[in-house]
Image (cartoon, helix red, strand yellow):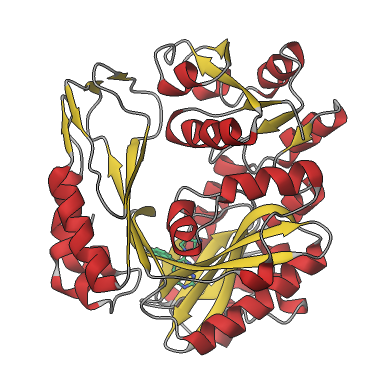
Amino acid sequence: MIKRLLIANRGEIAVRIIRTCRELGIKTVAVYSTADQDCLHVRLADKAVCIGLPPSPQSYLNRDNLLMAAINTNSDAIHPGVGFLSESAAFARLVRDNGLIFIGPNPDVIDLLGDKVQARKTAHEFGLPITPGTAAIADSDAACKAALDMGFPIIIKAASGGGGKGMRIVRSESELAENFTLATAEAEANFSDRRVYIERFLENPRHVELQLLADGNGKVAVLGERDCSVQKRHQKLIEESPSPGVTAEMRERMSESAIRLFRELKYQGAGTIEFLVEGDAFYFMEVNARVQVEHPVSELITNTDIIREQILACTEARLELDPAAVRVSGWAIECRINALTPGRITRLEVPGGPGVRFDSFLYAGYTMPPYYDSMVAKLIVHAPSRERALRRMERALSELCIEGIKTNQQEQQYIIEEKVFRSGSFGNAYYTQTFGVP
Ligand code: MV4
């Protein structure tokens, strides 16, 4: 077992990782920018190191500062958390080349999966269904030809994109050339990679993702799926597991193909495979080579500690859980609570009781800095059925009280009570269709 782990992140996910490390007997090193001295992760870790100024490029994205902090504290490994450097092959390589363990898959696998064109090709070769689409496209004439072949509407995506960044939906031939040029420029500006490709656009599919854990030696476990269709401007708002739109038969087919892909990649650690689901068809979209914000819903329905398994997978090439023994039980729902304003938390009352989990870095008296992600808490419930999970979430949301900043708590209450969401019959256009253009 490693002795000391540096967490190259902040906020809620840093707190989450510290909690598992405590239980594993691993000492933790927190890092913080000069805006984060009073953060909960700094208080909970065994040690904390300042790594720079508030803007992320000077602290949480500063690879050399993070590596030096790890070396100077005699850390054995670095956990990148979510966001920031969690899918940076260059950072993973730097960490490894300096004799430390990166908690994630190996850098070549991160590179492969970070290129969406290559990831699609690989997934297709291993038998996963992909949306009709192209490889990287050279110019707008080639784009036009491909679009006419597959039929409109189409969606232009950046090869180095993902998570919705730099996507453009095109509904007719007359809009194509202009959008192709804009997409290419956006891709260059955001990812320093101008390559884009085209897929047939599905109007209102579900966003369904499988949670996987793998030891890098052929042992691969699927911890069920999550439905993340409720999104506002590509920001997930609510996640649940199981998905109301996935049958046992579809889950079986998806899992079988997912296991094959991860086994072939010799994937190590925690990862997610995203699919679009339309009726009883599913299409591979991309792999997220990290642990995700919404992992707790999978933890609750499978009774596992995903961070624990991830750390064991990456540091000892083993999983504690038995893939064949994973059972999905009941229903879990997560509501993300986002700050709409910065400011000081003057009052905090946390929900509790049966089947309620509150993952957060807030405490009364804490002042939210304006520099980072707006998510301040995840409220997660677990119950025997979807109907009971919804009732439990209503109850938990009514107990939650955050004063001093504005949050999206009311909007979450509204969605949980809204009839289409409650019916379980919705796709990724749900938010826009229900609340108008965001
Ligand atoms: C799509 C799609 C429909 N058709 N691809 C969004 C995140 C990124 N992983 C890919 N995404 C999508 N890709 C095809 N071929 C729909 C989405 C999508 C989406 C699109 C517009 C507005 C909200 C969305 C939410 C989730 C997924």
137 lies left or right of 223? right
Instruction: Residue 47: give x, y in percent of width and height.
Output: 59, 14
Q: Quadrant of the N terminus?
A: top right
- On the image, the x and y values in percent for residue 12 come to 43, 34
- Judge by depth and name the residue closer to the eye, 82 or 194: 82
Residue drawn at point x = 27 percent, y = 76 percent: 424
- Quadrant of residue 148 in the image? bottom right
Residue 156, given in percent of the width and then of the height, sits at: 52, 65
Q: Nearer the viewer, residue 277 or 180?
A: 277
Up/down of 403 relative to 317, above or below: above
Task: Classify 299 as above or below 348.
Answer: below
Instruction: Mark yes or no: residue 133 visible.
Output: no
Nearest the eye: 131 or 355: 355
* In this rendering, position of residue 220 left or right of residue 162: right
Q: Classify residue 436 by image quadrant.
A: bottom left
Q: In which quadrant is the C terminus drawn?
A: bottom left
Q: Quadrant of ligand 1?
A: bottom left
The reply, left or right, for residue 20 in relation to residue 26 is: left
Residue shown at 73% from the left, 15% from the top? 68
